Structures are given as C-alpha cells and as structure tokens.
C-alpha cells in the first residue's frame, strides 16, 4: 500500500483547519433565520446544528468542567447513541481541545470505518467530511479482511493519539466512561461508554503522564445533549408543523364505528412515528383505558372515546348520538387538564432544578384538588386495577403522576428520549433531580392523571388522561413548539 508523506498530512490538516475556522466564524457571526434554514437540505440543516453546537456549547461546557481535552471513542461493535445522534458517527476517535480563544479545536484522529469490500459501511457516518464542522479529519478505514500478518486491530486502534495529545499537552482529559451519573436500577438501556479493552489500550498509548490526567466525560456528554442550539430549536418547530398536518388529517378521517385501532393503539395510518394518535376509553376493571395496552385488540374508534395526539398536545372527543357538546365528566376532565398545564407552564423554568420544580407544582396542584403520586397507575401491581389503586385516596381528588423527561435530537434530525440529564417527576435515579434546567432545554410534558368519575356498574371509576407534549424550557416558563390547544376538538 502506498503511504502518504507525513509532511503532506500536516499541511492537509492545516488547510482543513483554516477552512473550518472560516466556516465556524461565519456560523457564529449570523445565525440563519427559520426561512433560510427551510431552504436547506436535511443534511445541510443537520450540519448547521452540529457547527452551532461546536461553536456555542462546546466552549461553555468544557470550561465549566475545567476540561482541556475531550476524547470520545466509538466502535460499531459497542452501541453509542451519543456518538450516533450527536457526533454523527458510530466509530472513530473524536478529540475536542481547548487551545484558548473563543472556539474549541475539533478533530477526528482515530480509526473510523468507511466503505467495505462487501458493500456495507458504518452504521452512522452523516457526511462528516462535508459538514464544515471539523478542523482535522483523518481518512476513514476501508473495511476488508487482510492477508494474515502480526498486526491486529489492537495495534492500530489508537495509533498516533499519543503524538496528537503531546502536541497539545492537556492538563485534564475527559474520556467517555461513566462514574457517577448511573441509570436507575432496572434500566435496560445502559450505555456505560468504552470497554475495558479500549480503556487499557488508550492508557497504554498515552503513557503514564497523560493517563493520570483522565477523568469521566459524563457531565460533558450530558450538558452537550441537553442544551439545544438555535437551529436545533427551529428544526423542532418545523417538525412540529409537519406533524400537526398529519394529525389533523387523521382526526378529519375518523369515522366512529369504522376507523380501526391498530397495533399499540395507533389510530389512522402511521405516516410519522412522532404523529402518534391513540384512543382513551373507560374500560372494564383490570384493563387499561389507554388504547396501546392489552384489551384493545380488533377495536375501532367508538362514540364517547377521547382521541389524543399526545406528542403534539392535540385532543378530541367523539360525540355520542344526540350529543352536541361533551358530557359534564369530559368537560371537567378537559378543564382539569388546562389547569394542570398552566401550573406546569409557570413552574418549569431554566435554572431551576427538578427537585425545586416538583415541590412547587405539587403545592400548587394540591390547591386545585390534584394529588401528586409517584407511581403511574398502569404500572401499579396488580396492573390496571383501579379499585385497588384508589382505595387509599379521597374519591374527590384527581391523582397525577409526572415524568417530564428530556428529549434530544442533536444533529441526527431524529428525536429520542434523554435520561442522562434533568428529569422532572418521580422516576429515574435521585441525581437527576439536582441538575438545573439549561437554556432551551427540550423535554416532554409527560404525565398521567386519573380523575374520579362515577361510571356504570362494573366499569372503572376513574377517567384517564395522558399527555406527552414536547416543549422548550425558558427563563419565563414553558415555550410550546406550537400554540397550545385551548378548546377540545369535537368529532361527529
């Protein structure tokens, strides 16, 4: 194989660095408007988000944590949602270095999988070479099974990293492994970072001097994820507008007694994973009132159902025969929802911790006869046994369970749940309650509430309502991605 002259590599890096710095300075000087962003292709918009993240968020979080160099190591064999969603790759060694000034140097220096002789490539690549976000980008590896030789992947994984680090001489090096911010005890999605093999290979490559300067990058990863940049918020609002069109189409197409309720309670054709429409209905004891649970097989939308696009905060009621407006119990349910929303909108603010917010909204909700309970009713054992659950409660009080958790997107263009960060409610490990909400924190207003409502004999005595609306936290309170619904939609 023909080798490149090392001088050529240095000159290439300098050229790339200069080009990227020019792009970065353009990015930070004038941020694009909503109209300008909507003219971009999907990949161009994602790369704009990545550049803004590097320009705006990186310097702040690294200096807050007193980190000089952040090394994030990825391999396809170890799942890494942060690498894929936020950095745009499933393999490679990404190095961010604070070299002074108003920006952080961005480099991809390690082995990153590229094309393959068999036609496949890395799970996530995301046009990094064309992103304009990096100063130094090493060539991706062509994946092929080579002729036998003594050298293995372990000899190559961190080749050149020591020289790269020595040239920058960082005092604190953050690496992607977890130390303090552990998940809740029964979490099935645990992403602890690099393997012991990676860690030992990295330590060996760096040598004792720099290995002693390694700390966990967990706070950097968390703060990077939970702090959206302007173009990210604008994309979220554009996505909301697109979702609302789909939801309105589904609502308009509902025919009581005919429209089927599909798998996981889905009403209407699923054109977007985010535009998820579900039905609520008073069911027999032991069955959930939410359509995506067991007991709803082979069902259709019926008169008297509540139809909800919870992610968009859109709700409708299907009128029964002879009804021109919802019955008193549904009106009360809707008015209670509006009161609860108002309290959340006023108490959730940037800079406050979830612990402070929970205490505040719990006291305010109590004043309107709404009691905050830790467990969600459908998770209670015996499952969905409303009478067993309600025995200890005043039948005049509405019961609410809250889980306002983070929602990320980064430069992936796909929304995903974030549990590494502030989580407002009763779920998750205790440490999530003490993470202040960052500027423009993107999260879901998720809560279930159960309103006492006398039903026919043998039917549940509570009405269920579930919200999962995505919103933004600001210093003034909650900013909705679209105007919040004030009147319940009626379907005939």
Image: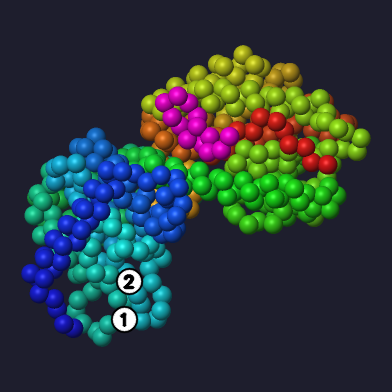
**Quadrant of the rendering where the C terminus is positioned:** top right
In front: 98, or 434?
A: 98
Image depth: mark 2 or mark 1 in front: 2
Q: Where is residue 303 in the image (x, y as percent from the top left)?
A: 84, 41
Crowd rating for badge 2 (residues with CA inside 10 Å; few <14, some 14–19, many 20+): some
Residue 437 in which image quadrant: top left
Magenta residues?
Answer: 471-483
**Residue 330 can be seen, yes or no:** yes
Crowd rating for badge 1 (residues with CA inside 10 Å; few <14, some 14–19, many 20+): few
Q: Which residue position is annotated with label 2?
A: 114
Q: Is the residue 354 above or below the residue 131 in the image? A: above
Query: Which structural element holds mark 2?
Result: strand
Which of the two labelled residues, at mark 2 and mark 1, occupies the earlier sequence position? 2
Q: Which residue position is annotated with label 1?
A: 145
Q: Position of residue 129 (x, y in %)?
A: 29, 64
Left or right of 119? Residue 271 is right
Please say whether residue 181 is one of the residues in the magenta stretch: no
**Residue 378 can be seen, yes or no:** no
The residue depicted at 77 percent of the width and 37 percent of the height is: 490
Q: Where is residue 2 in the image (x, y as percent from the top left)?
A: 16, 82
Left or right of 300? Residue 51 is left
Left or right of 335? Residue 58 is left
In front: 221, or 204?
A: 221
Query: Which structural element holds mark 1?
Result: loop
Residue 234 in which image quadrant: top left
């Amino acid at each position: 194989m023909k080798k490149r002259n090392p001088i050529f590599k240095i000159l290439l890096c300098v050229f790339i660095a200069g080009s990227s710095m020019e792009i970065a300075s353009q990015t930070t000087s004038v941020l694009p408007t909503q109209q300008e962003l909507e003219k971009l292709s999907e990949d161009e918009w994602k790369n704009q988000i990545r550049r803004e993240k590097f320009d705006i968020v990186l310097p702040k979080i690294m200096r807050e944590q007193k980190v000089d160099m952040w090394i994030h190591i990825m391999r396809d064999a170890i799942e890494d949602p942060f690498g894929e969603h936020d950095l745009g790759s499933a393999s490679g060694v990404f190095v961010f270095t604070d070299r002074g000034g108003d920006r952080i140097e961005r480099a991809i220096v390690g082995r990153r999988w590229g094309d393959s002789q068999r036609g496949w490539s890395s799970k996530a690549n995301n046009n990094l070479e064309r992103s304009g976000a990096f100063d130094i980008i090493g060539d991706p590896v062509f994946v092929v099974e080579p002729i036998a030789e003594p050298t293995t992947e372990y000899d190559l994984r961190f080749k050149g990293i020591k020289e790269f680090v020595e040239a920058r001489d960082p005092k604190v090096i953050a690496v992607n492994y977890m130390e303090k911010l552990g998940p809740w005890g029964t979490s099935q999605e645990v992403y602890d970072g690099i393997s012991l093999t990676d860690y030992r290979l990295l330590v060996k490559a760096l040598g004792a001097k720099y290995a002693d300067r390694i700390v966990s990058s967990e706070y950097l990863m968390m703060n990077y994820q939970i702090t959206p940049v302007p173009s990210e918020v604008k994309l979220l609002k554009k996505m909301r507008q697109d979702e609302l069109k789909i939801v309105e189409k589904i609502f308009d197409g509902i025919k009581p007694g005919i429209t089927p309720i599909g798998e996981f309670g889905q009403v209407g054709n699923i054109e977007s994973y985010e535009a998820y429409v579900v039905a609520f209905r008073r069911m027999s004891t032991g069955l959930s009132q939410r359509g995506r649970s067991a007991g709803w097989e082979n069902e259709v939308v019926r008169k008297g159902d509540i139809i909800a696009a919870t992610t968009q905060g859109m709700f409708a009621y299907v009128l029964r025969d002879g009804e021109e407006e919802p019955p008193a119990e549904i009106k009360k349910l809707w008015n209670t929802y509006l009161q609860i929303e108002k309290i959340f909108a006023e108490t959730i603010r940037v800079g406050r911790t979830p612990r402070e917010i929970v205490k505040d909204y719990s006291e305010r909700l109590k004043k309107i006869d709404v009691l905050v309970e830790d467990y969600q009713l459908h998770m209670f054992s015996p499952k969905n046994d409303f009478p067993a659950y309600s025995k200890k409660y005043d039948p005049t009080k509405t019961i609410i369970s809250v889980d306002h958790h983070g929602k990320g997107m980064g430069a992936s263009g796909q929304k995903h749940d974030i549990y590494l960060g502030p989580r407002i409610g009763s779920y998750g490990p205790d440490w999530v309650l003490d993470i202040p909400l960052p500027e423009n924190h993107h999260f879901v207003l998720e809560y279930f509430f159960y309103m006492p409502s006398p039903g026919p004999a043998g039917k549940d005595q509570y009405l269920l309502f579930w919200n999962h609306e995505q919103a933004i936290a600001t210093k003034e309170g909650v900013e909705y991605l679209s105007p919040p619904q004030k009147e319940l939609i009626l379907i005939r």
